[in-house]
Image (tube, grey):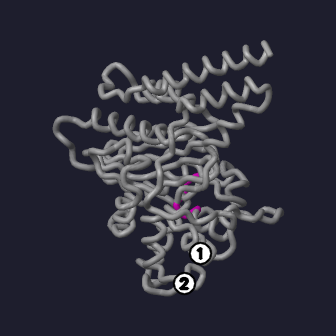
């Protein structure tokens, strides 16, 4: 009993300290004496983030400045896969190879309806219909390579077998979207309507945000455009963390972009992005079943926000379990954070 009590006390102390660190974190507004790298490091330390649960890619569309951490680590993408998927269909429409009012049997509606449902309400059923309308799962993944600059040797095999992407890929897609934004006006408008007051939009309230969020099996992600005076692109992937991490990450990079802005705004530069499709050799092994078949549609847009990862009830449960002499607090924490994709 004394052994379990000692463990319980140590765990309780750890949770209290970690909770206090996160609660005490404040987004800096003056970066005169701190670099962006140092600011991100402090942010990560406050929330216990590392290569196992956090990835970020950032770009200032005016200055071209970029920052990335763990950006080539493939993680569960959740509904962020719908960003390049919808881009592909919009380009087919602009090329005249597909009409927006065409009825797609796999989708159960027109392409026009699918775009709105996929981007504004993150409708899973229609989005998956759009995906398989392109062919087999690997066919879809090869087509998405159109928007990415990563060479084949850097792409992990799981990319072709399951719903995995990395923030480096998502940043490439955002760069493409922003570069050719005149061709994606409707898509960006839908992204601006999506999930108000949550994800990036909870951390950035003074500027418009166009985003594609995702929530599934512990993954809590968001990617999008934040319309600061110098618009920025941001992609954040996480695993088993609280919604507050996404909010604070968006607030941090927004604050940095605003602080950077000169008193007199220079003419916006035109980002040049050269992206070409890279042929992919088909591996000998057969692709595994996609996780998309198991995704259940979640009614939107009204949903409860994800609770903080450090609520006091967690401490009480941890103490109770250890006093009972069995069970794993880590399992409790994992089960609490494990969630169906908020789409």
Which x, y percent locates residue 185? 33, 67
Rendered residue at 42%/52% (across/down): 224
Number of marks in the image?
2
Mark earlier in primary sequence (2, 1): 2
Q: Residue 182 carries which label?
A: none
Rendered residue at 83%/62% (across/down): 285
- Asked whether the residues under the numbered discs 2 and 1 touch, taking CB atoms below 8 Å apart as contact, a structural biologist would say yes
Q: Which mark is residue 104?
A: 2
Image quadrant holding the N terminus, namely: top right
- Left or right? Give the position of 228 relative to 23: left
Quarter residue 332 falls in: top right
- For the question of whether residue 230 can be seen, the reply is no
Q: Is mark 2 on a helix, strand or loop?
A: strand
Give the residue pinned by disc 1.
Answer: 129
Rendered residue at 48%/37% (across/down): 245
Quarter residue 189 falls in: bottom left
What's drawn in magenta, residue-wise?
145-150
Which x, y percent locates residue 75? 63, 48
| Up-down relation of residue 267 to residue 12 (above or below) | below
In the picture as drawn, the residue positioned furthest to the right comes out as: 284
Q: Is mark 1 on a helix, strand or loop?
A: helix
Q: Nearer the viewer, residue 26 or 14?
A: 14
How many C-alpha atoms fall within 10 Å of the one at disc 2: few (<14), some, or many (≥20)? Answer: some
């Amino acid at each position: 009993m004394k052994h379990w009590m000692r463990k319980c006390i140590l765990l309780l102390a750890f949770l209290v300290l970690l909770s206090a660190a996160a609660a005490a974190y404040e987004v800096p507004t003056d970066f005169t004496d701190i670099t962006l790298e140092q600011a991100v490091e402090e942010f990560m330390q406050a929330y216990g983030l590392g290569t196992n649960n956090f990835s970020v890619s950032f770009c200032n569309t005016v200055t071209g400045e970029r920052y990335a951490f763990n950006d080539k680590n493939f993680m569960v993408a959740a509904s962020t896969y719908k960003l390049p998927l919808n881009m592909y269909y919009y380009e087919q429409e602009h090329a005249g190879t597909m009409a927006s009012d065409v009825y797609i049997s796999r989708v159960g509606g027109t392409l026009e309806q699918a775009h709105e449902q996929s981007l504004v309400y993150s409708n899973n059923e229609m989005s998956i219909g759009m995906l398989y309308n392109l062919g087999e799962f690997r066919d879809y993944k090869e087509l998405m390579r159109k928007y990415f600059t990563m060479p084949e040797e850097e792409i992990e095999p799981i990319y072709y077998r399951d719903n995995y992407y990395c923030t480096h890929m998502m940043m490439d897609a955002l760069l493409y979207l922003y570069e050719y934004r005149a061709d994606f006006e409707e898509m960006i408008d839908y992204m601006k309507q999506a999930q108000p007051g949550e994800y990036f939009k909870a951390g950035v309230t003074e500027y418009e945000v166009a985003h594609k969020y995702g929530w599934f099996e512990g993954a809590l992600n968001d990617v999008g455009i934040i319309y600061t005076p110098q618009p920025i692109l941001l992609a954040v992937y996480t695993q088993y963390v609280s919604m507050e991490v996404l909010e604070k990450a968006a607030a941090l990079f927004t604050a940095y972009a605003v602080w950077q802005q000169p008193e007199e705004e220079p003419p916006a530069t035109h980002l040049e992005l050269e992206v070409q499709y890279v042929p992919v050799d088909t591996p000998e092994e057969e692709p595994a079943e996609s996780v998309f078949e198991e995704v259940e549609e979640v009614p939107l847009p009204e949903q409860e926000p994800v609770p903080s990862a450090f609520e006091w009830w967690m401490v009480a449960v941890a103490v109770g379990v250890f006093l009972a002499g069995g069970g794993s607090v880590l399992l409790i924490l994992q089960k609490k954070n494990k969630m169906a994709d908020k789409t």
